[in-house]
Amino acid sequence: GLHDDAGMKQGHPHTVNDGHEYSSRERNDIMGASRFREEGRILFREGEWEKAAESFTKAIEASCKLPVLLTNRALCNQKLERWELVEKDAREAIEHPEGSTSVKAHYLLGKALLEQKKFGQAMESLLKAMSLSSSPDFKSYRLSIDAALYFAKKKIAEEKRSLAVQEDEKVTASWLGLVERCYNSRTEEDETAKGSAQELSKERKDAIHALMRSLRSRQEGRKVPGSIVCSLSKKIMLDPVATPSGVTYERGAIERYLQENEYREPGGSRTLCMEQLIPNVALKAFIDEFLAENPLLYDMGG
């Protein structure tokens, strides 16, 4: 969210109190940008995304397009699903000398490209965001980046599968055509062989259809193991955590459940605190490997 940004604060090179001698006009512009930025943050928290975007635009115009303000406006446009504008602001933020290593900018660019079905480009931006997010400060972003990456991989896999299906259909049509030509050639040469030729032709066509069904079944036969699906969210876990009783849940799902149920463990009466949740590292490794091998089975929408 907006609170993750490093904004116009003491010591930032664009603030009034950074030791640089500013003209009166420059000081007014900087103070104005700070005021509009704070106004935008408040409006964003209140869900007034259109008005928040307008405030950030005023701040941007008064501050030489600071990356933090561009990404804040991009967040507003993300809420409004204006993906081309999100892409534009994120790219401008990244092109700025202070924004080239911005996790938020690279993530927002990847998300915008993903929504515009530019899956290959989205993967590049999301992988860059992931590589920049090693600090514990970006833990919440890593989960979002993870989810977006898996979704992008799924979409790329779907495109490949669609092309493969089209190719299979061409091959099937070619084989069936060859069988038909063989049948026609044989019956033209020998009218008395029409019955046996027709039977042989049918057998060959049935064998071709059976082979293609078998190939499709093999490609689509893998199922999602129940052990990697959270019983609360009904989705594949990306951040699995175990309770003291040994049950594993998606972190976000169990945290919401505890907050809504007076911190009582699901299905029981024992008290369970957030601090007692332990990352299930082994299961996370298995899930990552499973989804890497089966990208089509990832479903961000549950």
Image: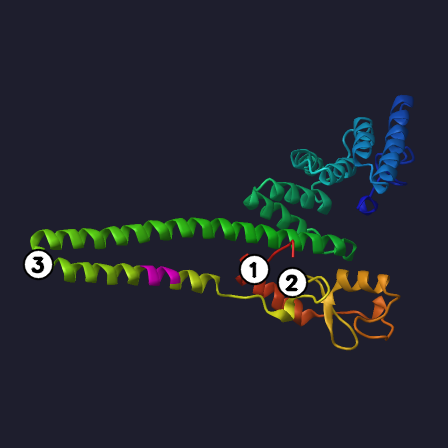
Residue occupied by mark 2: 236
Label 2: element kind: loop
Instruction: Give the secondary structure at mark 3.
Output: helix
Alpha carbons under labels 1 and 3: distance apart: 53 Å
Taking the image as drawn, is residue 131 in sight? no
Q: Amino acid at mark 2?
A: Ile
* Up-down relation of residue 14 to residue 244 (above or below): above
Q: CA distance from mark 1 to mark 2?
A: 9 Å
Q: How many marks?
A: 3
Residue at 68% across / 35% down in the picture?
A: 82
- In the foreground, 163 or 106: 163
Characterize the local packing of mark 2: few (<14), some (14-19) or many (20 or more) Cα atoms within 10 angstroms. many
Which range is magenta?
Answer: 209-213
For disc 1, the marked residue is 297
CA–CA distance in space, label 3 to label 2: 62 Å
User: Mark 1 vs mark 3: which is more N-terminal?
Assistant: 3
